[in-house]
Image (cartoon, helix red, strand yellow):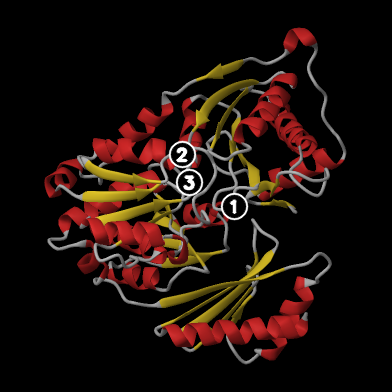
């Protein structure tokens, strides 16, 4: 069981001892610390919350609402929602911040508090440190009885989000409708089942089949949208003669596609395809984290722009995008960030832009995928036990490969001619991630295997 405090929020498993898991006591403690930080700023005393479809969602929601109200803060509860929808609702409500109750791609036993600032973006590292300090010191004071906060519930923000997508200049609903796409959606028993079908209908896609559409949090498979977890979607697309499959994670900020023959479009290429479409219409720079495919850099250069890498984590990507004035960015895990829409990973705007690009392509999804290079990223992980000194391990690996170009901005990235490997501790799980990319699958796997052996040796 685990409790992880990082730039991705306060994340842990449900059940177990306080301090070791995301127990009710920990939910209250970190919510109180965050709410106290917001209240100290003055100004708005409103906080927006929303949750994915997890089993523990309602329990955590009740704790969060009561804690915020006890601090004298008003809560606007969107109920079952998506991460990007809550991010958009915060500035729309002129709120002081927001909390998204989701553990994103983690299995059903996990939940988390994703903390937002007043513009609907993840709080900074400095603010995150402040929350952790207040929680550690129990540094919060609750309101007197006549100054308790109020609760408001609303369901208007799904349509708000869909309308914003339809009004986005580069989303071409007319062209999408003319293609009469037939689509299968894997909603993974979470809020994608509530949001993706209405969006597709609004875009003119009327033939939609939804897999795992009951929102019960009992995920039908591992919720991370990786090929090995999307077998049912792949089979359904191929068997039913559909044009494509769409998979989202439980909080609908990650997105990937399946081609009409059941093969994966590739989550790495979700961002590549959308960036290519954006850059055709809008010249500029791009950003992705350094665990993402080099194909984005190549597409960017082909359009006359500049590509910039960032550390892993949405807040780091957003920071770099602002620094270089990027017109599109995101992460190779299927996370798309469209800055003039909002600074957050958003599978829903991603669907609108991808289908707009696909509508311009005369042939099918498989042919569309063929426009882009076929690099392969081997994605692996090693579980960590408490007490391991990761910095020491990475130091020994750096020494071993000292003759290769090395970047230590975020873990350890080592380049081998045109190939690379990136080692880093996860922001969301107690693991070391090992990603390697090459033109050839066997080469990428062999590079990753070599580094995994190094890690185990030094451990």
The reply to whether residue 458 is visible in this rendering is yes
Crowd around label 2: few <14 · some 14–19 · many ≥20 (10 Å): many
In the picture, measured across the screen, residue 255 lies left or right of residue 71, that is: left
Residue placed under numbered mark 1 in the picture: 107
Give whichever of 71, 364 is nearer the camera.
364
Instruction: Give the mark, 2 or 3, whose residue is nearer the N terminus.
Output: 2
In the displayed structure, does residue 66 sit left or right of residue 53?
right
Q: Which residue is mark 2?
A: 191
Q: Callout 3: helix, strand or loop? A: loop
Where residue 311 sits, quadrant-wise, is bottom right
Q: Which mark is residue 344?
A: 3
Q: Where's residue 308, x and y in %? A: 46, 66
Residue visible at 16% across and 60% down in the picture: 361
Front label number (2 vs 3): 2
Which sits in the foreground, 397 or 407? 397
Q: What's the residue at 42%, 28% (across, down)?
A: 157
Tell me the CA gap for discs 2 and 1.
15 Å
Is label 2 in a helix, a strand or a loop?
A: loop
Quadrant for residue 150, please give it: top right
Residue depicted at 20% across the width and 68% down the height: 367
Q: Quadrant of the C terminus?
A: bottom right
How far across and how far down the image is residue 15, in percent? 75, 44
Vertical position of residue 151 compared to residue 291: above or below: above
The residues tagged by marks 2 and 3 sit, at their Cα atoms, a distance apart of: 17 Å
Q: Residue 256's spot in the image, x, y percent?
A: 38, 57
Image position, residue 206 (x, y; %): 21, 40
Label 1: few (<14), some (14–19) or many (≥20) C-alpha neighbours in 10 Å: some
Q: Is residue 410 above or below residue 326?
A: below
In the displayed image of the protein, which residue is found farthest to the bottom?
403
**In-image side of 348 versus 395 (left or right):** left
């Amino acid at each position: 069981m685990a409790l992880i405090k990082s730039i991705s929020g306060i994340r842990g498993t449900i059940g177990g001892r306080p301090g070791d898991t995301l127990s009710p006591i920990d939910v209250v403690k970190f919510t109180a610390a965050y709410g106290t930080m917001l209240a100290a700023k003055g100004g708005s005393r409103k906080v927006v919350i929303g949750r994915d479809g997890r089993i523990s969602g309602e329990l955590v929601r009740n704790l969060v609402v009561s804690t915020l109200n006890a601090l004298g803060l008003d809560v606007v509860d969107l109920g079952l929602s998506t991460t990007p929808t809550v991010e958009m609702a915060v500035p729309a409500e002129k709120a002081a911040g927001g909390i998204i109750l989701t553990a994103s791609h983690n299995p059903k036993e996990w939940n988390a508090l994703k903390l937002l600032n007043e513009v609907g973006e993840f709080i900074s590292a400095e603010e995150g440190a402040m929350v952790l300090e207040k929680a550690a010191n129990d540094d919060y004071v609750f309101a007197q009885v006549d100054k308790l906060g109020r609760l408001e519930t609303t369901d208007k923000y799904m349509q708000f989000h869909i309308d914003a997508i339809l009004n986005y200049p580069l989303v071409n609903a007319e062209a999408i409708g003319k293609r009469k796409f037939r689509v299968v959606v894997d909603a993974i028993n979470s809020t994608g089942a509530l949001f993706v079908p209405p969006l597709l209908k609004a875009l003119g896609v009327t033939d939609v089949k939804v897999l795992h559409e009951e929102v019960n949090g009992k995920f039908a498979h591992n919720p991370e949208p990786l090929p090995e977890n999307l077998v049912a979607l792949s089979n359904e697309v191929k068997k039913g003669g559909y044009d494509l499959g769409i998979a989202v994670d439980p909080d609908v900020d990650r997105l990937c596609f399946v081609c009409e023959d059941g093969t994966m479009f590739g989550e790495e290429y979700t961002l590549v395809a959308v960036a290519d479409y954006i850059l055709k219409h809008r010249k500029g720079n791009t950003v992705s984290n350094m665990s993402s495919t080099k194909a984005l850099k190549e597409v960017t250069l082909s359009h006359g722009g500049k590509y910039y890498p960032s550390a892993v984590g949405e807040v780091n990507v957003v920071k770099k995008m602002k620094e270089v004035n990027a017109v599109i960015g995101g992460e190779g895990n299927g996370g798309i960030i469209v800055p003039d829409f909002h600074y957050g990973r958003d599978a829903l705007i991603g669907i609108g832009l991808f289908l707009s690009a696909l509508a311009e392509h005369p042939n099918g999804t498989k042919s569309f995928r063929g426009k882009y290079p076929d690099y392969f990223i081997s994605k692996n992980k090693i579980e960590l036990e408490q007490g391991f000194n990761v910095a020491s391990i990475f130091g020994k690996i750096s020494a071993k490969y000292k003759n290769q170009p090395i970047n230590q901005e975020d873990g350890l990235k080592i380049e081998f001619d045109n190939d690379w490997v990136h080692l880093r501790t996860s922001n969301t799980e107690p693991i070391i991630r090992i990603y390697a990319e090459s033109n050839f699958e066997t080469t990428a796997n062999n590079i990753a295997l070599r580094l995994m052996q190094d890690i185990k040796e030094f451990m």
